[in-house]
Amino acid sequence: MTTLQLLKICFLSAIASAGVAHASAQEWIGQGYPPSKQCTPRPYDPKDADYESWMRSYQNAPLKAGFGNSKHVELALTVFDGDDLKPSGTYPLSCATTTSISVSSDGAVSQTLTTPDAVQGGGFGKLPAESLKILRSLIASLAVHPPDDYSELPPPGRRAVLQVSQGRRVLARVYDRADMPLSVLAIFGLVGATHGPLTMNFPPNQTAKADQFDELGIPPDTMGLRRPNSRDPVTRGLQPDSAILAISPDHSMIIKRYFWLAGRTEIMDVQNSLVLHAVPETFSHDRLIYISRAWFTPDGRFALLLSNLPSILIYDTKTRQKVDTLPGLPSGAVAYYPSLDWSHGLAVSPAGKVDLWDAAAGRKLTAIDLDGEVQHVSFSPDDSLFAVTTVRQNNDQSSTFRLRIWETKTGRFVRELRSLYYFEIDGIGNPLWWGDGKYLLAADREGRFGNYVVGIWNAESGKFRGGFSGCADSTNDPFSVALAGQRLIERCPDDKILMWDAAAAINQIAEFENSLLILP
């Protein structure tokens, strides 16, 4: 046994024995079958690290289809729940359940569930054509070279086995359910598995009603959050909800949108309580036209507003006059999303084409292929990257939502951040960069039967790490989620206000990522 293997076995032993309390402090999503209350953590067993013995049956046995599936099986997934537990009494006989999912050559998917009491099975039907096309490409790639598992067993309770047919051979690998390769995660999503990957769940630290908003201590200058306003102190009349779209660099001006009761967007001088300019909301062919995004230039001299027409409006904050353009900005664009320092930006043409723009040089750097319509753009804190969420309307009337990252200086595509279950999403919210830009947050949904969450991705690895859960329904309101210092705030469709200690959650994720075995 090598020194490296010995160190890894010692590490597994340590987290299994001394780390039980630490692991229980984390709330995981992904266990399909909650164990009996009569189950307790199982003590560490050296056999838990014996890779060859544990994997032998999966490497030597031929792939078998589930119930009602007689076709040739090309791929199988096996998920283990409760293998880290033991019965505390005579019942139940075992705490473990095994879920096996097989995919046949014709795209048929079947599942077998083995519990201590019974064996159940059934079919999910055939995959849609688009999913099957992607899956076949993944299977072909995995059959040539599946992601390495480095012949190491993940801790009990976090294991999933992938088997791929390679001619007459079967290639088998075991992966950590809490740190699966992206290609394996994609397979879980494509086959419609309802559980498997493990991610962290963070319930809200505080819950309130919208009429308690002023009591929650949310800073009044929090940007991007739809804020209910109390009644007028004199007339007792209702006042409209509002959201701050932008704050000038010296904090002397804000751009605020009011949502109803004469909906409008105002550029305001905060110090003098003076409205410098107001853009009223209007209707065009029964469609509400409003300001969706806004920015101040770095010197605060100009305000750039985007309308959902789409169109660009620019105002001089000193003269209060509208101007046609700004130095370095592209001509003819109907939308423009500047970087934080305004040296770059994303320009959208009337035809919907998107270009990365070098504002300092006043020229196009490169075209950005989005395969859909821009919904939100967000530059990282150091402006080195930008994230874009898009939507594409499909021929079957469905929609495909995507969240991707590009490099700002070159326009090089970096990676896509997928939801936990691939295309199984209702939409993706406005991306919010956390801290130094290692993590990215956005409203999302964890699978077809999953919770509505504000998802957390590691922007460097592309992996979905967990979510801030709490809202019962999804929301398409881009002003429903915001960061306020160390806190994350979400306003749900039922007008509940949820708040999290975002810093503590991100620290938990970083701590978990640091605990993963470092393999060569």
Image (cartoon, rainbow, N blue to C red):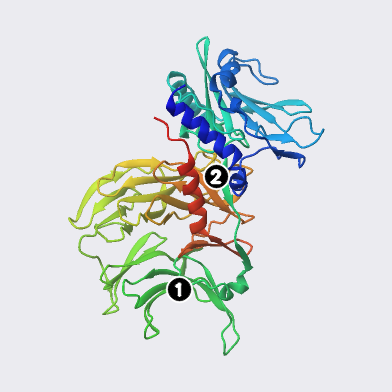
Q: Is residue 106 visible?
A: no
Residue 187, given in percent of the width and then of the height, sits at 53, 31
Between the C-alphas of marks 2 and 1, the distance is 32 Å
Mark 1 residue crowding within 10 angstroms, few (<14) / some (14–19) / many (20+): some
Relative to 71, say whether 78 is above or below. Answer: below
Q: Is residue 226 visible?
A: yes
Amino acid under label 1? Arg
User: Quick one: which residue is furthest to the top in this view?
Assistant: 168
Residue 497, given in percent of the width and then of the height, sits at 59, 65
> In the rendered image, which residue does mark 2 sit on?
425
Mark 2 residue crowding within 10 angstroms, few (<14) / some (14–19) / many (20+): many
> In the rendered image, which residue does mark 1 sit on?
264
Relative to 149, say whether 328 is above or below. Answer: below
Image side of residue 248 versus residue 14, left or right: left
User: Quick one: which residue is furthest to the left in this view?
Assistant: 361
Observer-nearest of 300 and 43: 43
Residue 465, given in percent of the width and then of the height, sits at 51, 45
- Asked where in the image residue 80 lies, by quadrant, the reply is top right
Along the polypeptide, which appears first: circle 2 or circle 1? 1
